[in-house]
Amino acid sequence: MKIDFANLQKQYQSHKSEIDCAIQQVLDASNYIMGEQIVSLEKSLQNFCGAKYAVACSSGTDALILSLMAIEIKPDDEVITTPFTFVSTAEVISFVGAIPVFVDIDKDTYNIDVNKIEEQITNKTKAIMPVSLFGQPSDMDMIQQIARKYNLVVLTIPTAIHYPIPLHLQEAYKYLNYQRGDFKEAENLSKKIISLPMNPYLEDDEIKYIAESVCNAI
Ligand SMILES: Cc1ncc(COP(=O)(O)O)c(C=O)c1O
């Protein structure tokens, strides 16, 4: 049985009239930049998060690039992050010309190991980008404490994405000269961890098939 990790078609079908109506309103107004819908989305996000501002972007990657630009990250600046994340986290650091500096993950939470951050801080370090994996936040109290001590900005992002090869060993990051063995926890975990399809649109027979596959594997 082939089961999609996320099923956007089923998601769309279950909210079809609402989505179609919202898209039609945008087309009717033909006001694609800073239109009424964007302003109202930003307002509700701002209220929901209790934030001073909310800025809608075309993608998460763009949101991170804008954030790095806003804090004036420049070529050769260093930004500390985890190698166990979606590639976009490190990609945006490279995109603005800065250098991603990886720190291994904690073996229990799989998030950045806060006890290893300080040893990577240099006079080029400008920010820390922790990633909250699977909805579990990084140790933000400790990260904020380190950031205050060294005057660094903290940019956070959640993810549920990881790879069989952690970022420091991927072709795209060969130029950083990391070696196998540099981040043992991330390397060990990437050999063991699997992601199961888990979304509200799974049918009972699909859930049964996934559960049986896990039972057979362990
Ligand atoms: C860690 C991380 N960074 C950035 C992004 C932004 O991705 P996108 O540009 O596809 O919205 C994601 C999306 O899953 C992510 O998991």
Image: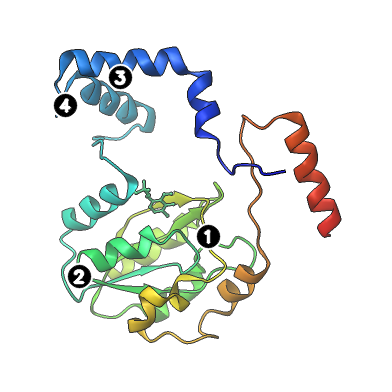
Residue matched to label 2:
97
Measuring from the top left, give residue 130's x and y in whole percent: 42, 60
Q: Nearer the viewer, mark 4 or mark 1?
A: 4
As measured in the structure, the alpha-carbon distance from the residue carrying label 4 to the one carrying label 1 is 34 Å
- Classify 181 as above or below 106: below
Q: Secondary structure at mark 3?
A: helix
Work out whether residue 151 can be spotted.
no
Q: Secondary structure at mark 4?
A: loop
Residue matched to label 4:
32
Q: Residue at x 27, y 68 (%)?
A: 94
Upstream in the sequence, badge 4 or badge 3?
3
Which of the 4 image quarters holds residue 93? bottom left
Look at the image and tell me in which quarter the N terminus lies: top right
Q: Is residue 171 left or right of residue 77?
A: right
Task: Choose between 215 and 126: the one closer to the eye.
Answer: 215
Q: Residue at x 23, y 57 (%)?
A: 68
- Classify 156 as above or below 121: above
C-beta proximity under 8 Å, tags 4 and 1: no
Upstream in the sequence, badge 1 or badge 3?
3
For label 1, the crowd category at 10 Å Cα-Cα, with few meaning under 14, some 14 to 19 and many 20 or more, is some
C-beta proximity under 8 Å, tags 4 and 3: no
Which of the 4 image quarters holds residue 140? bottom left
- Classify 51 as above or below 22: below
Upstream in the sequence, badge 4 or badge 1?
4
Q: Is residue 188 left or right of residue 76?
A: right
As measured in the structure, the alpha-carbon distance from the residue carrying label 2 to the one carrying label 3 is 36 Å
**What label sits on residue 66 in the rendered view?**
none
Residue matched to label 1:
162
Residue matched to label 3:
23
